[in-house]
Amino acid sequence: MTQANLIGQSSPLGATVVEGGVNFSLFSRTATSVELLLFDHTDAAAPARVIPIKPKSNRTYHYWHTFVPEIHAGQLYGYRVHGPCDPGRGIRMDANKVLLDPYGRGVVVPTGYDREAASEPGDNAATALKSVVVDPAAYDWEGDQPLQRAASQTIIYEMHVRGFTRHPSSGIEESKRGTYAGLIEKIPYLKQLGITAVELLPVFQFDAGDAPRGKINYWGYAPISFFAPHAAYSSGQQPLAAVDEFRDMVKALHRAGIEVILDVVFNHTAEGDQRGPKLCFRGVDNPTYYMLENGGERYANYSGCGNTVNANHPIVRRMIVDSLRYWVQEMHVDGFRFDLASILSRDPAGHPLPNPPVLWDIESDPALAGTKLLAEAWDAAGLYQVGSFVGDAWREWNGRFRDDVRDFFRGQPGSVRRVADRIVGSPEIYGHKEREAEQSVNFVTCHDGFTLNDLVSYNGKHNEDNGEQNRDGGDDNRSWNCGVEGPSDAPQVTALRDRQVKNFLTTTLLSLGVPMILMGDEVRHTQRGNNNAYCQDNELSWFDWSNLDRHADLRRFVSLLCARRMLRNVDPDRQRISVIRLLREANKAWHGVRLHQPDWGDASHCIAFGGELRRAGLRFHLILNAYWEPLEFELPELDHGRWRRWIDTGCESPDDIVPWEQAPQISGNSYRAIDRSVVMLYANTNQPEGVGNE
């Protein structure tokens, strides 16, 4: 092997398996020299080989590169980056620290991993994270491809990989609990529930130690690699296990018709503020990767997590887009939910940009053209862009849907007009863009905040277990405990809570837009009032599978809702039409307790919404009664047929929802909706009663 052969190439970045070995390339503008470290195993105390990357022969512009022959996928490596340390100017290099490759496709965590050692003076080779050489081509996808399901045919289930199967009640063998492999075993449950996409809380490699002392970061919003799947979610221990097991999971979900959406965190990293560790980006090229203030001395903190990624810097923009391409092309994911996405619209000084380059790079990239892009269109510094997020391809987490639906069902004055707008796709928010209703991602609960059970059981947060004297977590919960704080066996309270849970689920799954439900809400999972369980890797957060029997009625309720929403086949003779198509395409009108007389006043607590799809011969009438007393609602007269009751959350199971074709007829020209209930009626108007309606 000649010296020229060892120079390597500047492109592509990262570690690339090629004929005869591996090419390494790293960007660093501030480095004066770089060393590539090769390790023999995860717990190695020191590198087996140190390969200098020489500034004269192995540097092209700011790219440091070398070729190492006769090494393969699975090789562990890291970098030492030499250069100035001048915190006042934002340069924080430390050649004693082993650094991850920003483009590393895999990460291993040594048994003695020490976050503090990466913050303090001295060598940390024995306790540092290491990158792994990955060959993306060395996997048999068996013809799998991203599903590209239409947004109108999507129901999202937000879930945590570990929390879904970690509980002992999961029935999964210990070695697979809380892993990608464990999730595979529970795919039949997801299929039966009726969801069509899982939105996974962060699975990029994160630092679980980025949490208050004595706690761990459970949610995973502490990324340290934008390319590597989180190693702790693998049931295997070998360096490449997480990469392959993640792909096994994606392939299995696709076979079940379920898309995979990743919750991605490009707004900050686990390196924290100026007191934090040097794990990767900080030691490679701090001024490039982070927004800095006060001449570089401090980190801008629009994320609320200590630092902010400099997303619109050309190098960082490329890394973000390269990461997304990798997860789509090589890992076959179907979409991304961008955490605190509004940060990506800020320039290096933190000012919002009208046309943020990184967001347009993502939107216009042809490799991402069929990918679902969901934005959490706000950040921790007050930039709120729901309804005004840039671009045409993005869908938005609709935080106003969450707030307004919560307000309506807790009886907040002035909420009727707002909830009505949310039901029909929030045209007051999105109408100016002339976009489809599915621009709005509708949810009432998510990982951040109360579970649905706790939303109807607690007036205030109870986060004492987090060790921060209940100061953490949001205070604007818009919850109502139905008269008793916390658990209650009182029949009146439990019945009301059951009803409220079904009201929230019905409204979410029948509103126009893309519905999202939170893992465990379908079986009344409780976090005992903790609305910020980010550091609770225990039974407080884990899915309790014993709840399947305890709340089988609610799970049935959700399954039937999902089934009718997702109905795809249309048979004009039998009216096989999805309820969402019915609500979208029907000629619609608003009503109150009297027909065509909706009460939009601040003191109103009820609304009705009806319409007809003439060519299908179907009518519907949706009643939302958030008043604290029963109300009698007038019904439109029918030329043919009779009204049938599909849903009434005021009825006990199994009458609260029935299979569409089994909906019982009701008599009279009005319907009595009990206090705090939702009712959905329908009628077949082009055929006499007695003819099959399904």
Image (spheres, grey):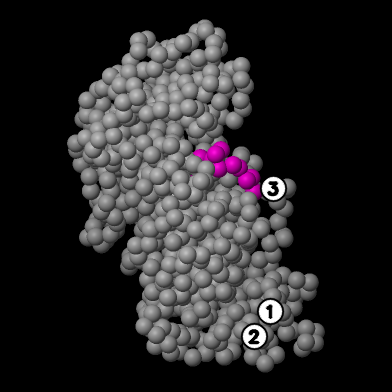
Give the mark nearer the N terminus: 1 vs 2.
1
Residue range highlighted in magenta: 146-159
Give the mark count.
Answer: 3
Q: Residue at x 22, y 45 (%)?
A: 459
Amino acid identity at mark 3: Asp
In the rendered view, tell whether residue 642 sits above or below residue 2: above
Residue under label 2: 61
Q: Which callout, 3 or 1, points to the residue nearer the camera?
A: 1
Which labelled disc corresponds to residue 572?
none
Nearer the camera: disc 1 or disc 2:
2
Relative horizontal placement of residue 324, taking residue 403 as reference (left or right): right
**First-in-chain label (3 vs 1):** 1
User: Could you say which disc has been placed on residue 144 in the image?
Assistant: 3
Q: Is residue 124 above or below residue 380?
A: below
Circles 1 and 2, Cβ within 8 Å, touching? The answer is yes
According to the picture, the residue beneath numbered tag 1 turns out to be: 10
- Do labels 3 and 1 touch, CB within 8 Å? no
**Residue type at the position of mark 2:** Tyr
* Residue 207 locus on image (x, y percent): 45, 66
Percent x, y of residue 638: 44, 13
Q: Is residue 14 above or below residue 254?
A: below
Q: CA distance from mark 3 to mark 1?
A: 32 Å
